[in-house]
Image (cartoon, coloured by chain):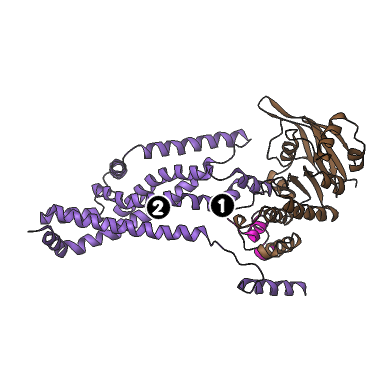
Chain colours: A purple, B brown
């Protein structure tokens, strides 16, 4: 029996089941990466708040920064599989055995873990923005938060997108560790197919191929988004024939003058 | 020209144990254009950055309409009224020329999009940048960037504009286009403090010239006084170096 016939057998018997795991894998990794990105951006904005003069808010900010640092160090410094176990069973321990629903727990664990990494990525992104961008925004009276939202974050996003894509790819693969708490994702089903069919090599080979298809698609899509964010190399000269917007502007001017 | 808009009293600024500004005193009244000249390192830019609180003064006080800008005024509201034009332009790289002139109006002044756009277009036209409103900063030349930066500042309807060596990063041709915009602004009655190395601009456009040396105001007066008959030795040698070029 060749490996190909093994694959064919596993596929015909467990194919649909394995494929059904893709849904959860994709859901958990997309949601985890997006929520992680939000956590990272939030932490990045908080960490760069200029030191307030008021001693109370300064002390408060110090405490918040300390918490963020502790969060980053702890979640970056421990394996996600262990975190999953601790959060899931920790909750059960403290709530008399009742457990959290699996998919939301999975999303939460991946989000918290990714957030720790992306916090550092965002910090690097903010540091890389020219000081002049902050000064330009400050000089027209923007507060720290307005500066961040309107000026800095859009530029940071463009700069950190390759690293965030990286995190996304890592997440697609690392959701497989969630099978330790029983989340029914791709690896969970591949492993059960392996156990039931006794064709371990073929089963995991199928899982491997699917993982690769997923990550490869994701990297291509993200590359397209990067290009889109980069913007066009050219611009339309205002008032030229190719500028469709210009006519609207001119009309507005005319009515405004009347 | 009686009402003082900004009054600077005993302004002092240290960077560590390096004293950059020792004791700066002057005031600017409505409609006045002051040029600040002096060699590099004399503290001109630091003084200007202190006025906008981009640097925190170590001592002394700065009054805006008689109110202390550090203790009595809300820093964001104050900065919205005092425009700043930078040597390195500092246009927002993520926005096009029009967006650069609108974002402050909508986010800081709370104007609606339509009003902001109308105002932005008005000032972009004033600086001759109407054809380039769709261009991002990286697609513009230095002189064009600086003109957009001036329009961005003007769109906030500031009471005073601070210019920090606005033409130092530009080639001679672009210097001309930016200076002519500034000249028209000055003639239209805008209150301006201009830190510059353009002696012709200082002489022909400003109402008052301040010569700074070593963290102090060494000499000040009308352009005729400072350029025509400088009293201090430092001023004479500085000007002779410039005028002999």
- A46 lies left or right of B62: left
Badge 2 crowding class, 10 Å Cα cut-off, few under 14, some 14 to 19, many 20 or more, is many
Label 2 – label 1 distance at C-alpha:
21 Å
Q: In the rendered image of this protein, does residue B39 appear above or below residue A188?
A: above
Q: Was residue B122 drawn as part of the magenta stretch in this picture?
A: no
Looking at the rendered structure, whether the residues under marks 2 and 1 are on a common chain is answered as: yes
Q: Quadrant of residue A185?
A: bottom left
**Taking the image as drawn, is residue B66 in sight?**
no
**Taking the image as drawn, is residue A34 in sight?**
yes
**Which sits in the foreground, A232 or A41?**
A232
- B208 lies left or right of B168: right
Q: Chain of mark 1?
A: A
Image quarter of the C terminus of chain B:
top right
Of the two numbered discs 2 and 1 on the same chain, state the one appearing first in sequence.
1
**Which sits in the foreground, A208 or A83?**
A208
SS at badge 1: helix
Q: Which residue ends up furthest to the front in the rendered image?
A: B245
SS at badge 2: helix
Question: Which mark, by number, is residue A149?
Answer: 1
In the rendered image, which residue does mark 2 sit on? A165
**Which sits in the foreground, A210 or B42?**
B42
Q: Was residue B89 drawn as part of the magenta stretch in this picture?
A: yes
Where residue B144 appears, as percent x and y from the top left, is 69, 56
Picture residue at 74% right of the left edge, 74% below the top: A254
Q: Which residues are magenta?
A: B86-115
């Amino acid at each position: 029996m060749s490996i190909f016939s093994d694959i064919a057998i596993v596929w015909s018997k467990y194919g649909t089941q394995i494929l059904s795991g893709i849904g959860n894998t994709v859901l958990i990794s997309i949601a985890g990466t997006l929520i992680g990105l939000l956590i990272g951006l939030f932490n990045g904005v908080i960490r760069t708040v200029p030191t307030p003069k008021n001693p109370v808010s300064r002390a408060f900010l110090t405490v918040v920064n300390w918490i963020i640092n502790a969060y980053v160090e702890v979640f970056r410094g421990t394996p996600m599989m262990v975190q999953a176990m601790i959060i899931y069973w920790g909750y059960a321990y403290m709530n008399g055995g009742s457990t959290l629903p699996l998919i939301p727990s999975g999303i939460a664990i991946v989000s918290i873990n990714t957030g720790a990494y992306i916090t550092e990525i965002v910090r690097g992104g903010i540091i890389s923005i020219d000081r002049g961008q902050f000064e330009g925004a400050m000089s027209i009276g923007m507060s720290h938060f307005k500066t961040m939202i309107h000026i800095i974050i859009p530029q940071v996003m463009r700069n950190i997108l390759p690293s965030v894509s990286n995190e996304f790819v890592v997440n697609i693969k690392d959701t497989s560790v969630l099978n330790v708490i029983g989340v029914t994702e791709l690896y969970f089903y591949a492993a059960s197919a392996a156990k039931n069919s006794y064709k371990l090599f073929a089963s995991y080979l199928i899982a491997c191929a699917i993982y690769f298809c997923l990550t490869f698609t994701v990297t291509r899509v993200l590359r397209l988004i990067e290009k889109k964010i980069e913007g066009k190399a050219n611009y339309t000269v205002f008032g030229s024939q190719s500028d469709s917007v210009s006519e609207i502007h001119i009309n507005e001017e005319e009515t405004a003058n009347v | 020209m009686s009402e003082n808009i900004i009054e600077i009293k005993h302004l002092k600024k240290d960077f560590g144990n390096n004293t950059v500004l020792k004791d700066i005193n002057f005031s600017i009244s409505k409609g006045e254009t002051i040029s600040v000249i002096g060699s590099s390192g004399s503290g001109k830019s630091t003084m200007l950055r202190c006025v906008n609180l981009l640097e925190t003064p170590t001592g002394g006080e700065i009054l805006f309409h008689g109110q202390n800008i550090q203790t009595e005024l809300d820093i964001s509201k104050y900065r919205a009224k005092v425009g700043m034009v930078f040597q390195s332009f500092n246009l927002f790289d993520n926005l096009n020329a029009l967006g650069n002139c609108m974002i402050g109006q909508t986010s800081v002044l709370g104007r609606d999009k339509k009003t902001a756009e109308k105002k932005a277009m008005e000032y972009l036209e004033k600086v001759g940048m109407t054809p380039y409103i769709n261009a991002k900063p990286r697609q513009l030349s230095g002189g064009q960037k600086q003109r957009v930066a001036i329009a961005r500042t003007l769109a906030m309807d500031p009471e005073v504009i601070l210019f920090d060596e606005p033409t130092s990063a530009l080639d001679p041709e672009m210097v001309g286009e930016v200076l002519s915009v500034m000249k028209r602004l000055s003639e239209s009655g805008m209150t301006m403090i201009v830190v510059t190395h353009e002696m012709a601009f200082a002489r022909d456009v400003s109402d008052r010239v301040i010569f700074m040396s070593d963290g102090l105001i060494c000499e000040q007066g009308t352009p005729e006084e400072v350029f025509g008959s400088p009293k201090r030795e430092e001023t004479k040698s500085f000007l002779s170096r410039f005028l002999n070029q």
